[in-house]
Amino acid sequence: MYSEGMSTSERLIESTRELLWERGYVGTSPKAILERADAGQGSMYHHFKGKPDLALAAIRRTAQEMRAGAAAVLDGPGTPYERVEAYLRRERDVLRGCPIGRLTMDPDVIASDELRAPVDETLDWLRGRLAGIVEEGREQGLFAPSLNGEEIASAIVATVQGGYVLARASGSPEAFDAGVRGLLSLLAPRPA
């Protein structure tokens, strides 16, 4: 499952990331982590203080990966509208849900300031980056002057996260895609 050269600590982090996405924090037992990582009984406690410490490392890694993926399209070429569109239409496994967004539904993650912090920081970063792009588009006259960058950024993030929920509930990515198409039609650049 993992590459030959991957260290035990890396296998533990990757296994935890996958299990958190699939099962959430409560459903991710140390036994399941060790089995998936093909690691010995004492491995987790040799490399990490315990499940919360390992989960924090996994959540931070997932947050870094999510930011890098979003930045690749948001910082890419194109007009502000085209970059927002690229972000909304980028490849996603919508039926699995968002690995960061799903953590907001986990009561143990939300109850822990330490585990919740990378989730909150990532969503704040995403809203901030999107708000800047919307403001850039407003200044260029592509978007209506009345648009508020922070509000539109929140609407974009809410559309993506809500799209995951709708897709999972219906068992079809079409629900996600419909939300994206609707939002893009509302953001369509103003005619010159």
Image (tube, rainbow, N blue to C red):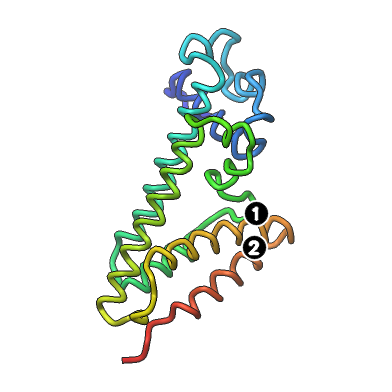
Question: Quadrant where the N terminus lies?
Answer: top right
Q: How far apart are the two marked residues, 2 and 1, measured between alpha carbons?
A: 6 Å
- Residue 154, compared with residue 121, is above or below; it is below
Q: Residue 84 in the image: x percent, y percent?
A: 40, 67
Front position in the image: 89 or 186 = 186
Residue ID at (43%, 70%): 85
- Residue 111, compared with residue 45, is above or below; it is below
- Tell me the element at label 1: loop
Judged left or right of residue 188, residue 159 is right
Front position in the image: 145 or 20 = 145
Mark 1 Cα within 10 Å, few/some/many (few <14, many 20+)?
A: some
Q: Quadrant of residue 165?
A: bottom right
Numbered circles on residues, count: 2
Question: Quadrant where the C terminus lies?
Answer: bottom left
- Where is mark 2, residue-wise? 173
At label 1, the amino acid type is Leu
Q: Residue 115 in the image: x percent, y percent?
A: 50, 31
- Tell me the element at label 2: loop
Q: Residue 45 in the image: x percent, y percent?
A: 52, 10
Judged left or right of residue 105, residue 58 is left
At label 2, the amino acid type is Pro
- Where is mark 1, residue-wise? 95
Residue ID at (43%, 35%): 61
Mark 2 Cα within 10 Å, few/some/many (few <14, many 20+)?
A: some
Q: Earlier in the sequence, mark 2 or mark 1?
A: 1
Front position in the image: 74 or 150 = 150
Residue ID at (61%, 57%): 164
Residue ID at (61%, 72%): 178
Q: Residue 29 in the image: x percent, y percent?
A: 66, 23
Whether the residues at callouts 2 and 1 have beta carbons within 8 Å, the answer is yes
